[in-house]
Image (cartoon, grey):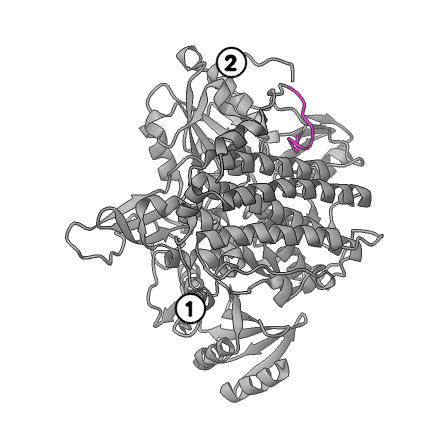
Amino acid sequence: MNNWFLRGVAAGVKTEFAPAGDVSESLSAGLPATTLQVSDDAAAALARLCPTRAIVAAGPVAEVDPDRCVLCMRCRGDASPVQWRHDVQVAHGEGSRARLGGRFARSLHVRIVDAGDCGSCLNELAQLAGPSYNLHRFGIFITPTPRQADVLLVVGPVTRQMREPLIAAYEAMPEPKRVVAVGACAASGGIFGPSLMCGAGAAEAVPVDLVVPGCPPSPYAVLAALREVCGQKQGRAT
Amino acid sequence: MTSQIFRELETICPDIVWETEDRSVCARIPASHLRAAAIYLHEREWRLGTLVAREYDRSLEVRYCFYATLHDGWLQLLVAVDPAERTLPSIVSAVIAADWFEREIEDLFSIRFTQHPRLGDFVLHDDRWAENLGLMRPHLKPDEVKEQRREWTPKRVLEEEGSFVMPVGPIYSGDAESALFLLETVGEDVVRAVPRLFFKYRAIEKLAEGKTPADVLLLAERCNGTSAIGNGLAYCEAVERALGVNVPRRAIALRTFFAELERIRHHTTSIREICASTALTVAASQALWLEERLLRVSGELAGHRYFFGVLELGGLRRDFDTALLRSTTEQVASLLGRVEELGTALASSNSFLDRIEQIGIVSAEQAHTFELVGPFARASGVAADLRVLQPYAGYSDVVFDVPIEREGDGYARLRVLFAEMKESLRIMRALELPDGTVHASPVSGAGRALGWTEAPRGASVQWVEVDRAGAIVRYRLTPPSFRNWHGFHLATEDFAFQDFPIILATLDLSVAENDR
């Protein structure tokens, strides 16, 4: 016989402080940092290297769009001029539109919708509810029904056959509601879209408030984005 | 052995034309002999690897790729199809595993398989798309892909009064992948469950056309992000075989190392999902934590928690320090010790065992006829493992066992997962890591070839054709979940509704991988 309760207690607390800044590669594969000043040739070479047009050359400037980066790793390494950052604060949106605050500060319910995800973003989201990340301590919960959800969390490029279910889920949610697009696919279509069967991300189907780039983003990056929606103050301490 | 089979095939198909194509044997046969040849191979324990349809400007062909299970070797049957008539005889009555392949080809290439029991609504859903869209035909223009709304009602078997179909999905549960399940029920008990998949169809094979082989590797890795090495390596091997690239010995060893590390992490995920499906939260949390540790070990080593960007055509993107690989192995070994403790605790938890024993039973005979793959098949007593049957990468140099269970129920599948992880560690420890480069000298040229791996969920079989300009003209991706979803209904006959998530978790099927 097993006493799972005692086993749980004996394992001790595994939850970590949520980092607010840079983390190690064990937590995040990182993203290329924005805009680089290099030579004309170097910028063009970097742009050619990139399979998803995350790097675009404009004269001597290599403009980097992290939303498009699928971590092919070609512009990574000692020989590359591209700087990589391993920050968990990568979510971005328009102004403070994403913030719900108020009574949502410690009670936020999230409905995840898989709109064509490869599985790695979903797996990272599963980790969020695990002991290491423990999103529940921030008053954030994953709910199975859109009727009780405040946040629609979209992963995947939005395939043609998932577009309508995604919109239906959004419409079933009560007001006020927010949409968070997680991962390169939901942010921009990633490696799959826009194409015959995939869109260019969640924003084509539902109004996106926050984008969390990464392929996949660190669970801490998603956690930081959800806490942003809550309006929680995120310290610098780790 | 193989030559005798080839001779006997010649008596079955007198019009056979042998071709050697990039070191694999192809037999061009007329469609009228296809069924007889398929029956012959099937009876001699050759299994279906994949079907590849390929449309050129003025010709259309389907290749049936079989592999031997009693000895080494692959055989491809090439059948030309009249592009105007677009019909082929179905081989489903002899080779049940061809069922979904034929349905897929019918949907995407508009080839009709005569005597196939059930064509129609599959990849492209009938309520959204017109018939005969021909999505995979060459020179398709995007504006030809038009939607056409129609009524679609699921086929029902139950006629009893009060019976109904309960739809689950495509969006359901907390972080589940999108798929629709039609549960036919008379109340509490579900009589049968029919999956409707491909909501996540991204048309990866179509996307690959015209891209460089290096860019298609990104698609192969991301077809199922939790099995990037499993599917990515099969693709690399296919391209390397097609172009005659010699992969350095160190790269081969490191690829094997990463494939096994991925298997360990993947199986931990599956165990976690099984624990979570039975609502055993403490065990699920502990498995989640162990999985997170393995992800961190992976990220620390490779710079990516899911090994994206580790592989490169001809080798690996970068080399890894041998001492680091060895210390990683020992870190993994100590985590595996914790996983085993969890396994021991689970094995003595009656409430847990009550929920996973005797559910979702698939017999050895069923697993064999449906040619299921991976841990799913091995839990039903079928020793299907491409690492042993058709060794690739570094697997012919290491000794390991393929754990088999007989019961074919949920618990047998769980035990197979635990046992396989130990073997994976054994392989990681036994691998010799020779010195040298991990990059092959770049090779260009044209060619076509098969590549295969035993991915964490089972056999991944891929076929590529590269043209003289160095572009992919056809990429065929057959991941293990596509094979195993075909056997899903075997495990979901006459069960109690509350067992559904548990059966689903023990089957360990990826929707992303199937939908592609």
Tell me the distance, in whole angstroms, between the alpha carbons under discs 1 and 2: 56 Å
In the rendering, which numbered label is found on residue A232?
2
Residue closest to the far front: A1
Q: What residue is drawn where x is 50% and y is 86%?
A: B12
Quarter of the view holding residue A28: top right
Q: Secondary structure at mark 1?
A: loop
**The magenta segment:** A21-31
The amino acid pointed to by label 2 is Gln
Which mark identifies residue B67?
none
User: B136 or B491: which is nearer to us?
Assistant: B491
Q: Principal SS element in the magenta part?
A: loop
User: Residue B471: horizontal and vertical position, in percent?
Assistant: 64, 56
Q: Residue A163: x, y in percent?
A: 39, 39
Query: Which label sits on residue B96?
Result: 1
Q: Chain of mark 1?
A: B
Residue B159, quarter of picture: bottom left
Residue at 41% over, 66% down: B111
Residue A237: give x, y in percent of width and height.
Answer: 65, 14
Q: Is residue A56 magenta?
A: no
Kindly tell me whether residue A215 is visible in this rendering.
no
The 10 Å Cα crowd at callout 1, few under 14, some 14 to 19, many 20 or more, is some
Is A28 within the magenta? Answer: yes
Query: What amino acid type is highlighted by mark number 1?
Result: Ile
Work out which residue is located at the far left of the displayed protein and give it: B161
Residue that appears at 41% across and 42% down: B351
Chain letter of the residue carrying label 2: A
From the viewer's perspective, is B202 left or right of B387? Answer: left
Q: Position of residue B185 (x, y in %)?
A: 25, 50
